[in-house]
Amino acid sequence: YQELAKQHGAEQILAIATEAMREARNSQDFLDTVKRETGIEVQIISGSAEAVLDYYGATYPLDIPSDAGVLDVGGGSSEIVTAKNRHITWLTSIPIGSGAIHDRYFSSDPPTREEMEAADSYLARYMQTIHIPEPPSALIVTGSSASSLLKLAQRAFKLDEHSDRLTNEDLSRCEGLLGALPAEEIAQRFEQRLERARILAAGALIIQAVMQYMHISEIRVSSHGVREGVVLTYSRYGEHWLDEVNSIASRHAASAANEDAQDVTAA
């Protein structure tokens, strides 16, 4: 990737690491090895910082509603952000991702109805513990699961290939397909990477759980996310880009924590 970047004339190369590296016991050994072998210093960012970058990347296009929220479904974590007039009002990072849900609930290929129902029930219960102060009226979803589900729906159900929208019904149909066919067949028939096809049902369940909590019937899928967020913040703040992101993240993460603490006290 460094060689590709240089071929395209990149003057600065930035590298970040997210949930997998936040949780890994040997993360520092890995970072040291990368630095020694490539000269690149990888920054492990917090879940809150990841949420900020997700928001900036996903809402960069001008046609995004100013009050749209953002959901990023990753393999190990998911980030949720709300906003007003394109300013973040609340954010959180939860340790629930498509890979984590798959590993915890799906031992069959394809997953059984019982496995899907157990995962869905867990996600619905978990969402009730988050306490989003003011759920948005529109939701932008980013991450590989969302992009792969959009592609799957377009291929399998002949949806408009120029549309970036998925409805609750579209996602339910995807879940039905993913529960009926093994991952290898999904990958071959609908042009999916096999490793992505294996965890796609879990990604669909997470997205639907958030939609149901927010009472949203349709999402827009964005191919832009944390990477574009890094580029945008670096272009604006230069070498201090991560300090600025951490500052924004800590303000809104702190407000979310205070709200949760008040809820616990009231209870």
Image (cartoon, helix red, strand yellow):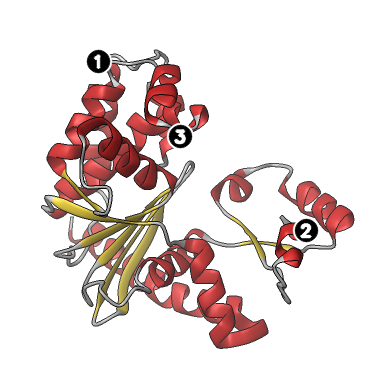
Looking at the image, tell me whether mark 2 or mark 1 is earlier in sequence order: 2
Q: Is residue 10 left or right of residue 152?
A: right
Residue neighbourhood size for the residue with mark 2, other residues' Cα within 10 Å, grouped as few (<14), some (14–19), many (≥20):
few
Residues marked 3 and 2 touching at CB (< 8 Å): no
Looking at the image, tell me whether mark 3 or mark 1 is earlier in sequence order: 3
Mark 1, secondary structure of its residue? helix
Instruction: Give 36 or 157, whichever is nearer the viewer.
Output: 157
The residue tagged 3 is: 100
Which disc is residue 114 wearing?
Answer: 1
Distance from disc 3 to disc 1, alpha carbons, whole Å, reads 18 Å
Which disc is residue 32 wearing?
Answer: none
Where residue 155 appears, as percent x and y from the top left, is 29, 35
Query: What kind of residue is marked 3?
Result: Ala
Query: What kind of residue is marked 2?
Result: Glu
Residues marked 2 and 1 touching at CB (< 8 Å): no
Quadrant of residue 137 within the rendered picture: bottom left
**Residue 205 in view (yes/no):** no
Where residue 156 appears, as percent x and y from the top left, is 26, 30
**Residue 34 in view (yes/no):** yes
Instruction: Give 125 or 21, whichever is nearer the viewer.
Output: 21
Instruction: Give 261 or 120, whichever is nearer the viewer.
Output: 120
Going by the picture, which residue comes out furthest to the bottom? 237
Query: What kind of residue is marked 1?
Result: Glu
Q: Is residue 10 left or right of residue 224?
A: right
Which disc is residue 3 wearing?
Answer: 2
Where residue 191 appears, as percent x and y from the top left, is 43, 32
